[in-house]
Image: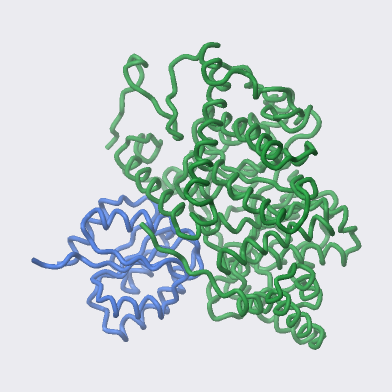
Amino acid sequence: MNKPEKTAGVAPEASKVLNESGIEVKPLYTAADVEASGGYSMVGLPGEYPFTRGIHRLMYRKQPWTMRQYAGFGNPRDTNKRFKYLIANGQTGLNVAFDLPTQIGLDSDDPLAVGEVGRVGMSIDTLRDFEIAFDGIDLEKITVSLTVNGSAAILIAMYLAMAEKRGYDVKKLRGTAQNDILKEYVGRGTWIFPVAPSVRLVGDTIEYCAAHAPKYSPVSVCGYHIRESGATPVQEMAYAFSIAKAYADEVLRRGLSVDEFAGRLSYNFNIFGNIFEQVAKFRAGRGLWAKIMKEQYNAQQPGSMWLRMIAGGGGGGLTFEQPENNIVRGAYYALISALSGAQTMALCSYDEAYTIPTEYSARISLRTMQILADEMGLTETVDPLAGSFYVETMTNQMRAEMVKEMAATDAAGGIVKLISEGRVQARVSAQAYQHQRDLESGKFPKIGVNRQRMEEEEEHPVEFHPYNEEDARTQVANLDRTKAERDAAATANALRRVAADAAAGVNLMPAIVEAVKAYASVGEITKEMVQVFGRFNEPIRF
Amino acid sequence: MSRPIKVLLAKPGLDGHDQGAKIVARALMDAGMEVIYTGLRQTPEAVASMSLQEDVDVISLSSMAGSHLPFCRTLKPLLEANGLTDKLWLIGGNLPKQDHQALRDLGFTGIFPTGARLDDIVAFIREQVK
């Protein structure tokens, strides 16, 4: 049954409205609200500190956002084909999905990988697979983002080795790895090692890339998945900043200066929700991050203060019910991202609550972004909502709330401690539970779920992505062949060095790079590290 | 007084999406049930042995990443071998409609795909576990 909740016609002052971050939304904003919330001191100009209005002076006028749909499935050959399809349709970056065994450091022939090889992403065992996956793709024109965390150090090493082998100058190579392990303990769950050695590994990748691949972004800190796990928009930003600070502190302890690495830190945020709250979230976050880097870390280079981000996805806002409505939601989410000055955008496709997107649904997502860029005027003027009494007030208020959240995290012992003990997890999952109750009661409106619900859902035009057991067998056969063909002594030596360096506490990246070049597999390298580091033991806390 | 209904809630396979499982765990606890949530990455063997050791009334799985059928095919004979066929077997998550019959045939009486309501899950368990 529909339960229409009457909102139109009710005097707005009669009911107090809170946004998802818990901040009151007024029926009308005036200059007095901006003043009362802190005024215009953090607004400034695009390309200038504190960068609230954008990290570049001309933003999209100079270059539209990078369009980077998440893609990958089956074996490297299947994925290479999808990459080329997306590029042929105007996509300007790649965002690589790996299967779960690859993400948690298991080879395709591992007993635990049965039924999982190539299922939710591309299967990678050795450097050979990377060579196939990126065959024929110009790595200077198309930047590649690797969505991998637990095994990120290995996959970054493989990417750099593959590029070097193809003759690219690694010093000039651009690209991004997600490589944000702390959020994996909160949401997404592809951890391998305990927290301390995992943070050390993130530090190793940042330190290594600063020296050897200075244009490469070794970390993309994700508020995204924490939001998907139940965090509010304010918490999404605050937790991400606390996590980024933990990584920065890890690298500073090694003696690097902040300007040697901070310019290559990047972010990944979510875009579902209230349009104005979201835009304010990003503007607030941009100013706050710049302030943190300048005042707390004494950064000198503007690039070190930039909040560079992919703002995309929006899966948490999409619905299983009436999936075509997700096309419309995706368009609004993309609008949010464009109004927020994102460097890169990706959209969850309308069928993504069901399956891996088809070529057709992935193309609709891509076209959604292209229509915004080419037809709707979103690239013409920088930060177009600036000066709105509402947006400026909300930007100030959300920034203040983020500061409070971060202070509370520090007061409770810091983000690493809170995550290790499962306390962030418990907090956001309690919120997710309340949100689910609010969805089911209709308190939180959702079209197709608690409003305009169809008693009989129509047969949806969703085509399920097939899973091919044969592909998994081919992948295992390819791994066997690579193992038979490689220089066994070189591989064994390289793997011994991984174990030795892990135990010695030195930067592991040189050893991992040597191992991947010797065609050691993801699983073999991970095993050496597990011997030294052990495995994460998940805290269960409600 | 009879003991509360005891539920094992497991995350099978390698899938790391545990938000749904944790939401259901809270709903069952709120409804007065005792919930043993396993955490991520449980093998079929682990699910069977925990179900036996904990003497649960309900064995439930939350699967979001598509490997539900291969997992349940391996799990079924293990549950049978451990004499757990009289327990209620449930599965929830991202379960395409075309797989529901196969899951039922494997012994999963309760199938709660994305979009299922918490109260319906609670009511189903109360009705089935007498």
Q: Which chain is blue?
A: B
* Quadrant assignment for the N terminus of chain B: bottom left
* Quadrant assignment for the C terminus of chain B: bottom left
Whether residue A88 is visible here, answered yes or no, is no
Residue at the spot 64% in from the left edge and 44% down from the top edge = A346
- From the viewer's perspective, is residue A383 above or below residue A115? above
Residue A170 drawn at (x, y percent) = 86, 58
Residue at the spot 44% in from the left edge and 69% down from the top edge = B12
Q: How many marks on residues?
A: 0
Residue A371 drawn at (x, y percent) = 67, 32
Q: Is residue B1 left or right of residue A162?
A: left
Residue at the spot 80% in from the left edge and 78% down from the top edge = A518
Q: Is residue A191 left or right of residue A374?
A: left
- From the viewer's perspective, is residue A219 above or below residue A283? below
Which residue in the rendered view is the most extreme toward the left? B1
Q: Quadrant of residue A161?
A: bottom right
Residue A314 drawn at (x, y percent) = 54, 43
Residue B122 drawn at (x, y percent) = 24, 56
Whether residue A50 is visible here, answered yes or no, is yes
Q: Which chain is green?
A: A
Q: Is residue B2 left or right of residue A388?
A: left
Q: Pick the residue in front: A393 or A367.
A: A393
- From the viewer's perspective, is residue A252 above or below residue A467? above
Q: Pick the residue in front: A83 or A302.
A: A302
Residue at the spot 65% in from the left edge and 66% down from the top edge = A151
